[in-house]
């Protein structure tokens, strides 16, 4: 009986040591070897941020007006870019609760103020993200030349309609 109690006690003590160190833990801080391409990638990322200037629901904790760590990083970099080049942030949300959208907009404004950005009524707008997009004349020309999109194969049947060429060059309705 005493031996069994000692074994149970030893197993419990051994099990209470806590987890060992993770082998796949993310690195913390900066690596010793920094790629010589880092400046290039930073420049590319800044250009993309300047073209987009947006914040969306993924930059917040779900169902809350609190920024996630991704949102904090994005707004911190956007604030630095706004100090250099100006601009406004577009907040695009799929949330249906107007109080949450208003609270998130206020969170963005407060965070930018905390970083020293001169916030005006136009600094944060509730609209879709930016970008050049396609000009109407280009869309009209494409439609005039190409027509309306028609799929080459019937998605319901899973095969090409009769007379359509398959990827191998053979035709289901007679080859060339």
Image (cartoon, rainbow, N blue to C red):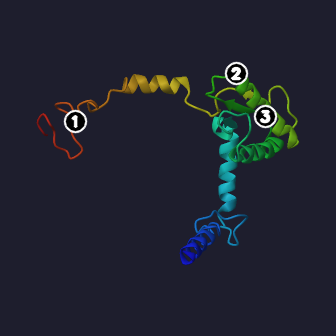
Quadrant for residue 60, please give it: top right
Distance of label 2 from label 3 (alpha carbons): 14 Å
Residue 29 located left or right of residue 153: right
Residue 160 position, x and y percent, is: 22, 34
Labels 1 & 3 near each other (Cβ < 8 A): no
Which quarter of the rendered picture does the N terminus lie within?
A: bottom right
Instruction: Identify the mark nearer the N-term, 2 or 3.
Output: 2
- Residue of label 1: 159
* Circle 3 residues within 10 Å: few <14, some 14–19, many ≥20: some
Q: Which mark is residue 107?
A: 3
- Residue of label 2: 98
> Closer to the camera, 16 or 94?
16
Q: Secondary structure at mark 2?
A: helix
In the image, residue 85 sits, relative to residue 31, either above or below, namely above
> Closer to the camera, 175 or 13?
13
Residue 176 located left or right of residue 100: left
């Amino acid at each position: 009986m005493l031996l069994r109690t000692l074994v149970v006690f030893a197993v419990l003590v051994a099990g209470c040591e806590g987890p060992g160190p993770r082998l796949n833990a993310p690195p913390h801080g900066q690596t010793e070897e920094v790629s010589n391409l880092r400046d290039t990638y930073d420049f590319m990322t800044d250009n993309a941020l300047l073209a987009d200037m947006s914040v969306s629901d993924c930059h917040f904790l779900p169902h809350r007006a609190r920024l996630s760590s991704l949102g904090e990083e994005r707004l911190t970099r956007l604030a630095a870019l706004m100090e250099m080049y100006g601009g406004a942030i577009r907040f695009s949300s799929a949330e249906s609760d107007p109080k949450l959208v208003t609270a998130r907009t206020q969170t963005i404004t407060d965070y930018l103020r905390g970083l020293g950005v001169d916030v005006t009524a136009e600094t944060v707008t509730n609209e879709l993200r930016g970008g050049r997009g396609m000009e109407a004349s280009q869309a009209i020309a494409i439609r005039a030349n190409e027509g309306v999109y028609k799929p080459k194969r019937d998605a319901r049947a899973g095969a090409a309609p009769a007379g359509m060429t398959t990827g191998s060059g053979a035709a289901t309705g007679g080859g060339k």
